[in-house]
Image (cartoon, rainbow, N blue to C red):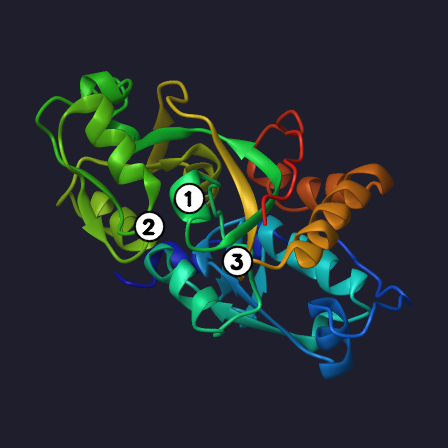
Amino acid sequence: MKRLVLAVVAAAVLSSVACARPQAVQFPAGTTMHRLQQDGRIRIGVKSDQPSLGFLNPATNHYEGFDIEIATIVAAELGLSRQQITFVTTTSRVRETYLIDGHVDIVVASYSMNDERRGRVGQAGPYFRTGQQLLVRRADKQVISGPDQIGRRTVCSASGSTSIDKWEQLYGTVPVAELTYTRCVQRLLTRSVDGVTTDGVVLLGYVAQLPTKLAVVGPEFSDDAYGIGYPKGDRAFCEFLNGVIAKAERDGRWNKAFHETLGRAGVRAPARPAIEPCRD
């Protein structure tokens, strides 16, 4: 059962990805950008179980999805190819820890920006906006037509995510916490929980894999902006990352990345969020 969600039609959802060519640029000595360029390697924390967003395809053993393409664009602006990226699977619970401990250089992993996280790490962007929703079994969508219909039924979410706190605040129950959303979806399919809650863009990726078994119900009930995490206090790096996002939006690489990943999973392109000034 563990491989059920991960293995089904993954290759069909994402048959090609956006291309980011390395740029010939020079950076001032002593900056993070210069160090990464000289090292010829960047370590990027990503999700591995979010179809169309951050997904380790078991058929190819390659990471794919919108977040992966955003990460690749960042690397290209450092003059690094995709082969010079080390992708590191990063769960919601360890994203800040990995940055603080130097396990990764940046995190591009459906990483919602908020002040609590900014107390520990830096967050550049945002590069994407979404909202929290509810995933149920398709057979139950008439009974559970939205989060206000869940009642005393059990909901699951990933530990370390903002989704757990938001659900508790709005609906008064504490979701079951699993390490990953895939484990939550597996529990939903085996009827040990009745719903899964997180950002709608994540949930729609699972629906794209199992459209006859899963459905997203109800409207979005939060406003979440995804940013790129980096070690706190590096303003120059933050300015660089914000510049990369803005450039990709202008030159069409953002659109290409979206339409070849999330767009193929049926996600509608959201309005581009305004990039926030660096706070470091």
Instruction: Tell me how far mark 2 sits from mark 3, CA to CA.
Output: 27 Å
Please give the residue where the numbered disc 1 appears in the rendered image.
206
Indicate the quadrant where residue 37 lies. Answer: bottom right
Q: Which amino acid does label 2 sit on?
A: Tyr
- Say few, some or many: other residues with alpha carbon within 10 Å of mark 2 (under 14 / 14 to 19 / 20 or more): many
Question: Local crowd at mark 1 within 10 Å, few (<14), some, or many (≥20)?
Answer: many
Q: Hey, which quadrant is residue 94 in on the image?
A: bottom left
Question: Of label 1 and label 3, which has the lower sequence position?
Answer: 1
Which label lies toward us, 2 or 3?
3
- Residue assigned mark 3: 232
Percent from the top left, x then y, of residue 110? 49, 47
Residue 181, which numbered label? 2
Q: What residue appears at the point 53 percent right and 52 percent down from the top-left corner? A: 122
Which label's residue is closer to the chain start, 2 or 3? 2
Q: Can residue 280 be seen? A: yes
Check disc 3: other Cα within 10 Å, few if <14, some if 14-19, many if 20+.
some
Amino acid at the residue labelled 3: Lys
Residue at the (48%, 47%) spot, across then down: 111
Given residues 48 and 72, the one toward you in this image is 72
Q: What SS does tag 2 mark?
A: helix
Element assignment for label 1: helix
